[in-house]
């Protein structure tokens, strides 16, 4: 299959593109490589895929991987209503995996316009291109943040998600509503994935895994919010990638019921881990105890996340199996090699 992977220079997009290539698919990666976090990390991910920075940093130009002829890349904004349709027209994709988005819950409070541009306008453009260029299946990133003030644990996709507490969460809920509308009106399949807290090698520098490790290594205190009384469904990147790729690869059945064209799944580890236990795992991997500065709960944050993934197990035999101890150790090993060696 020929698959468009947006957000290909990002954390999850990089691993999904890599896995699809390993399974023999043709992949076109897309990313705007914005400076929300260090662009050098994004270009280094692309370098791992055989893409030179000098080629990848030019907007609206197709770059070909030097290590895999089935991979090409284009730097492009999803908001670009001229060049995005042109890409769909010339490349003739079978499926689309939309992982591009302006990420970050706290940042959305400070920079709301960036979220609407990328996550709402950009997603609409993706939907329009899928409609106009006969895409069979759109798989797209939603987020566990849509559950907002939901107090029922574990989170299930049937739960009410009418109370988001950040603009980021609101944009992700809007994506689900828009995808439902397009699936109903135009008859192509859409699958939304509510990602829970993803961590692992090549992870984002704004995420807890990186922030804690980096601070401990540099003998700085870590910021522990809500005085440590937080729990997260931490999910290792390999488990996330396996689930996403299984969904992309599964053949599309001839759908006669429009309800089956629109699906939402939780994708997580199906366990809730105490933040302090997560910190302990990092301390043990580094052999150093963290200096901890305690802070109150941050705006837009929630106390606990926990994914019910029964539907994903039933439909795709999804089985997350990476322990926190193992996953943290793999991240720490990568961090030392990338930032210290």
Image: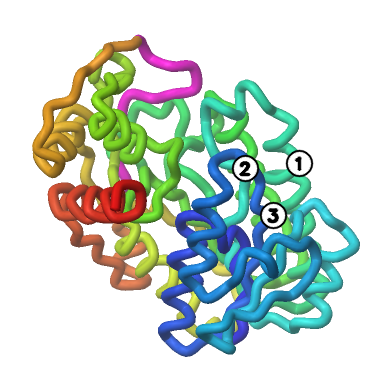
Residue under the image location 40 percent in, 50 percent down: 203
Residue under the image location 71 percent in, 36 percent down: 114
How was this image coloured? rainbow
Quarter where residue 62 is shown: bottom right
- CB contact under 8 Å: marks 1 and 2: yes
Asked if residue 138 shows in the view, the reply is no
Relative to 333, say whether 89 is above or below.
below
Q: CA distance from mark 1 to mark 2?
A: 9 Å
* Comparing labels 3 and 2, the label whose residue is closer to the camera: 3
Would you call the spot at circle 2 few (<14 residues within 10 Å), some (14-19), or many (20 or more)? Answer: many
Task: Using the image as rendered, state which of residue 28 and residue 285 is in the foreground.
Answer: 285
The residue that disc 3 covers is 32
Q: Is residue 275 left or right of residue 15?
A: left
The residue that disc 2 covers is 102
**Circle 1: element type:** helix
Asked if residue 158 shows in the view, the reply is yes
Residue 20 place in picture, x, y as percent: 47, 78
Residue 75 place in picture, x, y as percent: 72, 62
The span picked out in magenta is 296-307
**Circle 3: element type:** loop
Residue 322 place in picture, x, y as percent: 19, 58
Q: Earlier in the sequence, mark 3 or mark 2?
A: 3
């Amino acid at each position: 299959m020929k698959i468009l992977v947006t957000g290909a220079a990002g954390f999850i997009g990089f691993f999904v593109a890599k896995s699809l290539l390993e399974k023999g698919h043709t992949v076109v990666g897309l990313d705007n490589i914005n400076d929300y976090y260090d662009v050098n990390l994004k270009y280094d991910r692309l370098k791992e895929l055989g893409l030179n920075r000098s080629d990848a940093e030019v907007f609206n130009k197709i770059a070909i991987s030097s290590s895999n002829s089935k991979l090409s890349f284009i730097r492009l904004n999803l908001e670009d209503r001229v060049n995005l349709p042109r890409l769909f027209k010339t490349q003739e994709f079978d499926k689309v995996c939309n992982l591009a988005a302006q990420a970050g819950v706290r940042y959305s409070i400070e920079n709301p316009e960036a979220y609407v541009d990328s996550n709402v306008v950009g997603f609409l453009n993706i939907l329009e291109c899928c409609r106009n260029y006969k895409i069979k299946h759109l798989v797209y990133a939603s987020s566990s943040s849509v559950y907002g003030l939901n107090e029922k644990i574990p989170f299930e996709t049937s739960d009410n998600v009418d109370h988001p507490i950040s603009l980021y969460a609101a944009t992700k809920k809007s994506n689900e509503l828009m995808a439902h509308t397009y699936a109903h009106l135009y008859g192509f399949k859409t699958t939304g994935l509510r990602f829970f807290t993803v961590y692992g090698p090549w992870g984002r520098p704004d995420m807890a895994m990186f922030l804690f490790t980096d601070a401990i290594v540099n003998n700085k205190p870590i910021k522990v919010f809500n005085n440590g009384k937080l729990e997260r469904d931490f999910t290792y990147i390999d488990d996330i990638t396996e689930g996403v790729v299984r969904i992309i690869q599964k053949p599309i059945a001839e759908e006669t019921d429009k309800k089956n064209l629109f699906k939402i799944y939780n994708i997580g580890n199906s366990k809730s881990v105490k933040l302090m236990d997560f910190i302990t795992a990092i301390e043990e991997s580094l052999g150093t105890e963290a200096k901890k500065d305690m802070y109150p709960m941050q705006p837009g944050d929630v106390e606990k996340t926990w994914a019910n993934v029964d539907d994903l197990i039933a439909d795709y035999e999804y089985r997350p199996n990476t322990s926190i101890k193992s996953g943290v150790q793999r991240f720490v090993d990568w961090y030392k090699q990338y930032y210290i060696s």
